[in-house]
Amino acid sequence: MVDGGIANNTTLNSSGFMYIASGGTANITTINNNGSMRIYSGGTANNTTVNSNTDMDIYGIANNVTVN
């Protein structure tokens, strides 16, 4: 969980999960098979790649998202 902090260059693989809470930022994230990311209000994700069989829930800000 990123809450008021910064996560850089993160890969979420099978069943991996990342929460980005208010004030948190994730930069350069790749979500692979069965991985999941949830961005809450006030959270930001930059440069995210979403691959097949994954989930990304956006309630905050997501910039530069690529869906494969």
Image (cartoon, helix red, strand yellow):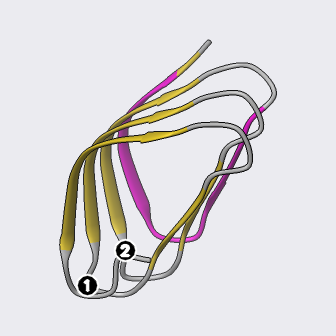
Q: In the image, what residue occupies the spot 67% across and 43% down?
A: 35
User: Residue 62 appears at what percent x and percent y?
Assistant: 41, 50
Q: In the image, what residue occupies the spot 28% across and 77% down?
A: 24
Q: Which residue is mark 2?
A: 43
User: Residue 23 appears at what percent x and percent y?
Assistant: 26, 84
Q: Residues within 10 Å of mark 2 (few under 14, many from 20)?
A: many
65 magenta-colored: yes
Relative vertical location of residue 54 with respect to residue 56 in this rendering, above or below: above
Tag 1–tag 2 contact (CB < 8 Å):
yes
User: Residue 54 appears at what percent x and percent y?
Assistant: 74, 36
Q: Give the residue type that dot 2 points to.
A: Gly
Q: Main secondary structure of the magenta part?
A: strand
Relative vertical location of residue 29 with respect to residue 24 in this rendering, above or below: above
Q: Give the residue type that dot 1 points to.
A: Gly
Q: Which residue is mark 1?
A: 23
Relative vertical location of residue 3 with respect to residue 67 in this rendering, above or below: below
Residue 21 in the figure: left or right of residue 32: left
